[in-house]
Image (spheres, rainbow, N blue to C red):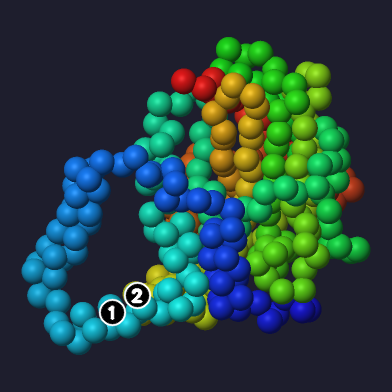
Amino acid sequence: MSTDTATAAASGASATERFHSDKSPFAAVADTSPERVDRLARKVIEALQQTVREEKVSYDEYNALKAWLINVGHDGEWPLFLDVWLEHVVEEVATEHREGSKGTIEGPYYVPGAPELGSVGTIEMREGEAGTPLVWTGAVTSVDGSPLAGALVELWHADADGFYSQFAPGIPEWNLRGNFRTDDQGRFEIHTIQPAPYQIPTDGSCGKLIAAAGWHAWRPAHLHVKVSAPGHELLTAQLYFPGDAHNDDDIASAVKPELLLDPKPQDDGSVTVDYGFVLDPER
Ligand code: DHB
Ligand code: FE
C-alpha cells in the first residue's frame, strides 16, 4: 500500500514542522532567571564532560557524535529522539502530585483540531480499514467522583501497519483521529480499530543509533488520548493491550501498569474495552 513509502525523513520532518507550528516553546519560559538557565545548562554539560572523562572518549568517537547530532537535525528527528528517550522523565516529574488517572508521554504525533464526533461516535477511517474493530466505553470524573459532562477526549492512534495520518504519506488527513465529548453522565463510547505495534522510524539518525547500539525500535500498540475539562488539569495518556511483546521493553519507556486495558473479545470478532479517566482539579 502507499504507506510503504513512509520514511524517517517524511515523518521526522513532519514532526519537526508540526512542533514549530503548534507551540511557542520559548514564550512559556521567557521569565526564567539566568540562575536557573545556568544551573540546568551546567548540569547537562557537566554530565557530558564526565562521560568523556570516565569512558575516555576518543577523537574519532567525538567526531562521530558531532556528525550524528548534526544529522538528527537534518533528518528532523529531534522530536522523535527527545520524545523517546527524555519525555517520559519529564512527564513523571510534571505529574507526580496527581491523585487522578496516570498519564504518560504525548509523543511526536498529536495534532489539535480533529473532527468532533460527539459522545457516541466512530473515528474517521478508510473504507475497509484493516484491524480488529474496537468499541471503547468509559466515563470521565473528577477526583471526588463527580462525573464531568462535556469533557473532551481527543483520540489519535496508528493504523494496522503502525502509521499515523499526517506523518506518513498517503493516509487521509484525519484518519484515526477524533475528538469526543462526554454526555450528561460524563460518558463516551468510541468505535475504532485496534492499532498495531509501532516501530519508530529506522531509516534516519535515531535508527542508526538503535542499530549501532544493538537496541530495538519497537513501541507496543497504543491508543493516544488527551482528556480535558474546565477547571481540571489536562491528562495526556496512552493505553496499551495486554500480551503485547513490547509492553515490558517499550523503547520510549512509556508503559505503566495502570495504562493496560482489559479487552473482551466478542463473538462478532470485535473487541470491547471499558476504561475511564479521573481528572485532578487545577491547583
Ligand atoms: C514516538 C512515536 C510514537 O507513536 C510515540 O507514541 C512516542 C514516540 C517516536 O517516534 O518518537
Ligand atoms: Fe504513538
Q: Is residue 232 visible?
A: yes
Q: Is residue 219 visible?
A: no
Say which mark, if any, is on residue 69. Answer: 2
User: What residue do we see at 46% from left, 50% from top?
Assistant: 25
Say which quadrant the N terminus sits in.
Answer: bottom right
- Residue 221 vs 236, above or below: the answer is below
Residue 142, image x, y percentages: 61, 19
Quarter holding residue 272: top right
| Amino acid at dot 1 | Lys
Residue 101, image x, y percentages: 54, 29
- Residue 93 vs 124, above or below: the answer is above
Ligand number 1: quarter of image: bottom right
User: What residue do we see at 75% from left, 21% from top?
Assistant: 149
Density class for disc 2 (Cα within 10 Å; few <14, some 14-19, many ≥20) is some
Density class for disc 1 (Cα within 10 Å; few <14, some 14-19, many ≥20) is few
Question: Foreground residue, 220 or 182?
Answer: 182
- Residue 57 vs 162, above or below: the answer is below
* Secondary structure found at label 1: helix
Say which mark, if any, is on residue 207. Answer: none
Give the residue at mark 1: 66
- Residue 129 vs 55, above or below: the answer is above
User: Is 78 situated left or right of 55 in this image?
Assistant: right
Whether tag 2 and tag 1 are in contact, CB under 8 A, the answer is yes
| Amino acid at dot 2 | Leu
